[in-house]
Image (tube, helix red, strand yellow):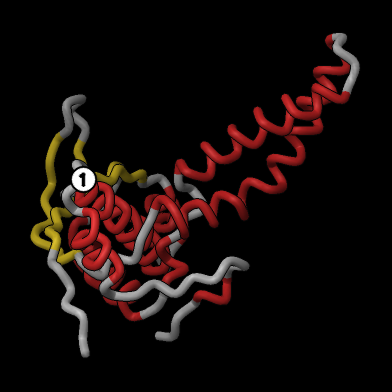
Amino acid sequence: MTASSNSFPIPFAPQSTQDTDLLQQIGFLPGVKELLSLRQVHALEHATVRVMEEMATIPLAAERVESITGLSTEQGFYLYGATDVAELRRAVPEALRRLVGGDWDIAVHPRCGTNLSVSMLLTLGLGSGLGWFLPKDPLGQALGFGVGAIAASSLAPDLGSLTQRHITTAIPFNLTVDTITAERDSWGRTTHFVRVHWVDVERVG
């Protein structure tokens, strides 16, 4: 599998020891390791869902996978929805293998909440900004927010993907999968939890 950094306009060339090196430099700060782990888990969550989407070869299965939602923590990630545990156990190691092997695009998912957050911020920012240059009456302000919303809807997918790629996810070079278990959350919903642990990567040479 070849690296896919050219799919994005901003250079992206992650190194296997980057988070280990960063942890050695600033690991004394509270929460640094948890944040680094969370970004890597987030990427693995996205990649797992994308692999499951590829595995869904019939419409009914594809519809089921599209209904799955996820939640990442520094210790692993939850998948909510009609998840087939056998399918999940095949998808997780495959997703990790592909990510570490250079298939970095699967760390980004179009249904991630990051995209929604980016869209909302863009709409608010562009709408408010345009409002400064338009009449202050209700019609002028409504026009500003309308134009801002249209512009945001056009820009959000690409900016959301860039935000995922460079901020909210990281290639999981340091993660090893421990267990995949079925659980129930505090609302009684069935969920599957993929537990991981952190392993430092040694620099070669």
How many numbered marks does the figure carry? 1
Q: x and y percent of residue 67 in the render?
A: 40, 45
Q: Is residue 157 left or right of residue 16?
A: right
Q: Is residue 135 above or below residue 195?
A: above
Frontmost residue, 17 versus 107: 17
Q: x and y percent of residue 127 in the render?
A: 74, 28
Question: Quadrant of residue 122 in the image?
Answer: top right
Q: Which residue does the image show at 24% across and 67% down from the upper left?
A: 21
Q: Report if residue 71 is visible in the image.
A: yes
Residue bearing the label numbered 1:
29
Q: Report if residue 78 is visible in the image.
A: no
Q: Which residue does the image show at 81% across and 17% down from the upper left?
A: 141
Label 1: few (<14), some (14–19) or many (≥20) C-alpha neighbours in 10 Å: few
Q: Is residue 15 left or right of residue 189?
A: right
Question: Quadrant of residue 146 in the image?
Answer: top right
Q: x and y percent of residue 185 in the render?
A: 17, 32
- Residue projecting furthest to the top: 137
Frontmost residue, 151 versus 109: 151
Q: Which element type, helix, strand or loop, lies under badge 1?
A: loop
Q: Amino acid at mark 1?
A: Leu
**Which image quadrant: the N terminus?**
bottom left
Q: Which residue does the image show at 57% across and 72% down from the upper left?
A: 7
**Which image quadrant: the C terminus?**
bottom left
Frontmost residue, 190 versus 70: 70
